[in-house]
Image: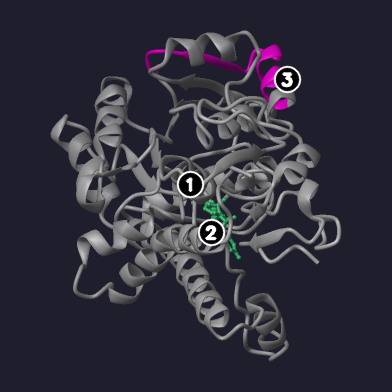
Amino acid sequence: MDIENTTVCVVGLGYIGLPTASLLGTRGFKVVGVDVSSDVVETINAGNIHIVEPDLDVLVKSAVGSGNLSASLEPVAADIFIIAVPTPLSGEQQPDLSFIRAAVAAISPYVVAGNLVVLESTSPVGTTDEIVAAMLAAAGHSVGRDVHIAYCPERVLPGRILIELVQNDRVVGGINDSSTAAALDFYQAFVNGDVYGTSAKTAEMVKLIENSYRDVNIAFANEISMIAEQEAINAWEVIELANRHPRVNILSPGPGVGGHCIAVDPWFLVSRNPPLARLISTARQVNDEKPRWVIEQVKARAERFKRPTIACLGLAFKADVDDLRESPAEDIASTLLDEDIGEIVVCEPYLTSHPRFELCSLEDAVNQADIVVLLVDHKAFRHLSAASLNHKVLIDTRGIVK
Ligand code: SAJ
C-alpha cells in the first residue's frame, strides 16, 4: 500500500477514533479526523487531547505537528473512511445506531469510486450490510464494486490502547470478497498482529462474543463470590485453587461490571435474538445486580454502628484508569450516600475532583472510617492489609487486601 499517498478520513474522535487517527498520521497516512464537537476539533488542531490515555498526548502532538493529522467538523474526500462513532444503548437495552446513520449520511457526498469505507463501531450483527452498505447504495454508490465496505472491530483495552492498536490481531470482514481484500490491505499496512479476513457479519459477531465471553465469565465469578460469602469461604482463594486445574480459567469477582463495552455489547446479541441469548442475558443481569448485593453487605455491617463513617476506596470502573463510565464503584458510593447509610468518605487517586464527593487521601479515608469498602483494585490500594487498615470492618469487593 502506498501509505504516503493514501488519505484517510476518521469519523468520530473518541477513545478509538483519535488513537487510530493519530497512529495512522504518525505512520505517514494523510488523516483528517472528524468530530461533531467544535471543542474536540479545536483541542486536537492545537495538538492537545480531550481524553486520558497513556502516551496519546505525545502521539497526537507528533501527528498534528507533522502535518499528517488535522481535525474538522465536516468530512473531506479521502481514499479510506473509518467510522468510529458511539453505539450506546437506548431504553430497553436496544442499540442506538443513530450515530452510525449520521456518520454514513455525512460521508456519503464525499465517497467516490475506489474508496474503502470501514465501520469500527461495535454494532449488532448485520449493521455493515443493513445500514452502511444499504445507505450508500441508496445514495447511488455502487457498493461492493466501486466502493468497498468492511467491518473491522476494535479490540483495544483502555489504558493500553496505543500498544494494543498495533500489537493485537485484527479481524476484518467485507460485504464481499473484494471489500475484504481492500480492508486486509489497509490494516496490514499498520498492524503488527495478524489480520484475518472474513465476512462482515462474522466480524461483527466476533466482536460481540469476545465481550460477551468476558461478561459471562465475570458473571460466573461474581456468582461464585456470592455463594462463597454465604458459605463463609474466600471466593478468590476458591477461584485461584480451581484455576490450578489445567482447563479452568475463571476471572475475578468484583463489585459489578463497568465501562462502555462489556456492560453494553452483550445486549447487542440479546436484542436481535432474545430467546436464544439466555445465558448472555442472565450474565448481564447477574453483573448488573452485583452492586446492589455489595450495598446490602455494607448495610448489614453498618447496623452495629449508630452512624458509621464509610470509606469508599476507588470510584473508577476498573483499576488504574480515571474513567467513570458505567462504574459500579461510583454507583455503590452514590447509592450509599443517597440511602444515607452513614458518613461517606471517598478516596480516588485518579481524580482531582468529583461532583458529589469531596475526595480525600487514602490515609485520611482509612483513619476516619468505621467501615472500609474497597471498590477498585488500583495500584495505590494493593499494599493494603487488615493490619494497615487497623483491623476495621472491611468489605473487599476485589479480594486484594491481604
Ligand atoms: N472485571 C471484573 N473481573 C475481571 C475482569 C474485569 O470484575 O476479572 C470488570 C472490570 O473491573 C470492569 C469490567 O469488568 O468493571 C470491564 O473491564 P475489562 O478490563 O474486562 O474490559 P474493558 O471494558 O476495559 O475492555 C474490553 C476488552 N474486551 C475484552 O477483553 C474481551 C477490550 O479488549 C475491548 O476492546 C473493549 O472491551 C471494547 O472496547 O470493546
Give me the residue at 56% from left, 51% from top. 306
Choose between 328 and 118: the one closer to the eye: 328
Q: Amino acid at mark 3?
A: Ser
Q: Where, quadrant-wise, is the N terminus in this rendering?
A: top right
Ligand 1 is found in the corner quadrant, namely bottom right
**Residue behind mark 2:** 298
Q: Is residue 264 left or right of residue 70?
A: left
- Count neighbours of disc 1 (C-alpha within 10 A) and say few if under 14, some if 14 to 19, many if 20 or more: many
Give me the residue at 80% from left, 41% from top. 363
Q: Which mark is residue 315?
A: none
In the image, is residue 77 part of the stretch drawn in magenta? no
110 is higher (above) or lower (below) than 95: above
Give me the residue at 38% from left, 55% from top. 265
**Residue behind mark 1:** 336
Choose between 341 and 236: the one closer to the eye: 341
Identify the magenta region: 59-76
Give me the residue at 31% from left, 58% from top. 267
Of marks 3 and 2, which one's residue comes earlier in the chain?
3
147 is higher (above) or lower (below) than 249: above
Determine whether label 2 and label 1 are within 8 Å by CB.
yes
**Residue behind mark 3:** 62
